[in-house]
Amino acid sequence: MNPDLPQPQRSVTTVPEFWDFMVRGSAPLVMMKKKLGEELWREKEKIALGYLEEVLAGKQNELTSDAWLGVGAK
């Protein structure tokens, strides 16, 4: 990790824990969950978790997701 970058505010060690963290903290996912309804959301969630497990298996000991926000002026 680059020492000049801030440390993650929160990290998790399992894919399901990462997914739960993302679903609770990501406005687009919250809106999608509400729009799809519980039954269809569970189907999509199963697909997403399977994909994340496949892609991240053995690659990470710790999963983080940080928001990098910026402001510009013209």
Image (cartoon, rainbow, N blue to C red):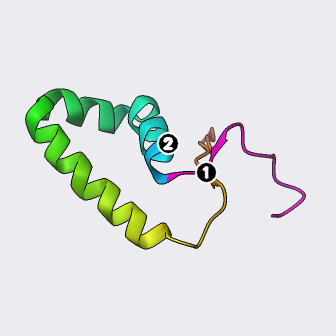
The residue wearing badge 2 is 17
Label disc, if present, on residue 34 of the rendered structure: none
The residue wearing badge 1 is 13
Give yes or no for contact between labels 1 and 2 (Cβ–Cβ under 8 Å). yes
Left or right position of 21 against 30: right
Callout 2 crowding tier (Cα within 10 Å): few <14, some 14–19, many ≥20: few
Residue, x 72% and y 44% (percent of image)?
Answer: 8
Q: Quadrant of residue 40?
A: top left
Q: Quadrant of residue 26?
A: top left
Q: Of residues 14 and 3, which is closer to you in this image?
A: 14
| Residue 3 magenta | yes
Kind of residue sitting beneath label 1: Thr
Q: Of residues 9 and 19, which is closer to you in this image?
A: 19
Relative to residue 62, is residue 40 depicted above or below? above
| Residue 49 magenta | no
Kind of residue sitting beneath label 2: Glu
Residue 46 locus on image (x, y percent):
24, 51
Q: Which residues are magenta?
A: 1-14
Residue, x 49% and y 36% (percent of image)?
Answer: 21
| Quarter of the rendering occupied by the C terminus | top right
Q: Of residues 53 and 41, which is closer to you in this image?
A: 53
Dot 1 falls on a residue whose secondary structure is: loop
Callout 1 crowding tier (Cα within 10 Å): few <14, some 14–19, many ≥20: few
Residue 24 locus on image (x, y percent):
42, 29
Residue 36 locus on image (x, y percent):
11, 35
Residue 33 locus on image (x, y percent):
22, 33
Cα separation, mark 1 vs mark 2, equals: 7 Å
Relative to residue 21, is residue 46 depicted above or below? below
